[in-house]
Every structure is written in structure tokens, then in C-alpha cells.
Amino acid sequence: MSRPMCYRCFWPQPLCWCGSITPMPSRTKFVFLLHPEEFKRAKAATGRLTHLCLADSELYSGTAFDDHPAVQALINDPANFPVLLYPTRDARDLSKGEFTPADTGGRRLVVFLLDATWHLVRHIWRDSPSLRRLPRIMFSAAAPSRYVIKHQPEAACLSTLEATHELLLALDRSGLDHYAMPDQLLGLFQRMQDVQLAFAAESARLGRQRHAPRKKSPRCTPPPPKPGAKRRRIFGPPTTTPPPAHPPT
Ligand SMILES: [Zn+2]
């Protein structure tokens, strides 16, 4: 029998995070665009939890956003200054002062974040030309990834919770926003990892008990975690070769 789920944070109800999350105000609007594959990986993905932590944020799933009414309304609203967080060489680096409040012309900054791996983000890039046309921003991460569960392939490849934390730090330092609750995103990330590590340890312990009489069984030892090289998220260091099927316009 499947466990009851919280359909807000998409964790099992006994582990629901919603009660420990305080939506944080911000001047910036954050829009998380999840690839459908990422959307299905609800528990492991941190984009949904990041969205819950930010009062002025939205989250949508799909690959083709050119006909998405809410996304297009945000892009085309003259009161907004929409940008894409996308670490290519031509992105303006907040950490180097390449994007400042003067650049927005007094408009509200709207940051679109593609919550997907480099492999999956190709689909969004191919199917959403309006996102490809947006100005791009990036940041230089102050800290390597704290991920221990997924064994990030590079220290600079960040989870969505970490990337949004680093983005908010950079926005704060640039004078574009005020990062009101800098401990929440990383605190949630750490607690989430603690729970997953505890589960992994318990699974390994139960596995050893179950197989204890069959000492010759090759399955007595849990297999090592699979490396995450094929799941490199896009919140990494800048790349000179954009992954999309179509070159950026
Ligand atoms: Zn919940």
C-alpha cells in the first residue's frame, strides 16, 4: 500500500516539510520551469521545495512555454524585466557586477530558472524560443555543492535549493534584492539530506538483517550509489558549448 503523500511538497505525509517552511518575501519574482521528467522525480527534486520557500514564486511543468499563458504574461508585461538564469559565457555575471539595478530601468526583475539537467533542458530550449531570447544572468557560486546524496559530478553543480540561495546572495550584493532569510534554503536542504541519509542507513541495516543467514549471497552488500555524471544540473559553471539542439538566438 502506498504511503499518503502531501501534495504540496510531494513528500510522504509523515515527512511533510510544509510546516517548517516560511515563505520569504522578495523584490524579485522567481519562476521555476520544471521538465516533466523532473516533475515526476518529486521527492528528489528540490525545485518544488524552493518554490514553497519563496512567497513571490511560481512553478510550472512542461517543455513548450511559448503558448503558456502565465509564462508569456510575465515575459510580455512591460512592468517586468524578465531574465533567464543560464550560465553560458554570454550571461551577465551578478557576482562580477555585470548586472545592476540600473539595468532593469525600474522594472520588476523576473528570473526564470530551468529546473532540469543539461540533458533534459535541451527539450525546453528547443520548444521555447521566447525563453531563448531572454537576457541571461548567472552568478559565481561562493561555495561548492553541499550535496552528498546525489554525488554531484562537479563541486560547482548545485541543487535548485543551493542555486537559488546563491542567486539570492548575489542579488542582495548587487542591490537588486534583500535576502531576508538566508538560513532557510540551506537549512531545509540540510534537513532533507539528513532524512535521506537516515533512510539510506536504515535500508542498509534492514538489508543486512534480511540477508544475514545467507552469507554467501552477493546481494548482502548494498550497491554503491550511482554517480550523478549523467544528471548534471544546469546550475554549474559556465559552458562555452550551450547544450540546446538549436543555437541561442
Ligand atoms: Zn508538505
Image: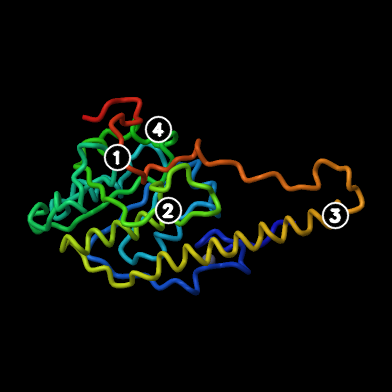
Q: Secondary structure at mark 3?
A: helix
Q: Nearer the viewer, mark 2 or mark 4?
A: 2
Residue 41 position within the rendered picture, expressed as x and y whole percent measured from the top left: 54, 48
Please, which residue is most extreme toward the right here? 213
Write down the residue under mark 4: 123
Residue 113 position within the rendered picture, expressed as x and y whole percent measured from the top left: 33, 48
**Three-letter code for the amino acid on which mark 1 is drawn:** Pro
- Sort mark 1 into few (<14), some (14-19) or many (20+) by Cα contacts within 10 Å: some
**Three-letter code for the amino acid on which mark 3 is drawn:** Arg
User: 226 or 35, which lies in front?
Assistant: 226
**Three-letter code for the amino acid on which mark 4 is drawn:** His
First of labels 1, 2 by sequence position: 2
Q: Gap between marks 1 and 3, in whole Å?
A: 46 Å
**Three-letter code for the amino acid on which mark 2 is drawn:** Ser
- Sort mark 3 into few (<14), some (14-19) or many (20+) by Cα contacts within 10 Å: few
First of labels 1, 4 by sequence position: 4
Write down the residue under mark 1: 238
Location of the C terminus (image quadrant): top left
Q: Gap between marks 1 and 4, in whole Å?
A: 19 Å
Quarter-of-image position of residue 168: bottom left
Residue ID at (18%, 45%): 92
Q: Secondary structure at mark 1?
A: loop
Q: Nearer the viewer, mark 3 or mark 2?
A: 2
Q: Gap between marks 1 and 2, in whole Å?
A: 15 Å
Write down the residue under mark 3: 210
Residue 35 position within the rendered picture, expressed as x and y whole percent measured from the top left: 44, 42
Write down the residue under mark 2: 145
- Sort mark 2 into few (<14), some (14-19) or many (20+) by Cα contacts within 10 Å: some
First of labels 3, 2 by sequence position: 2
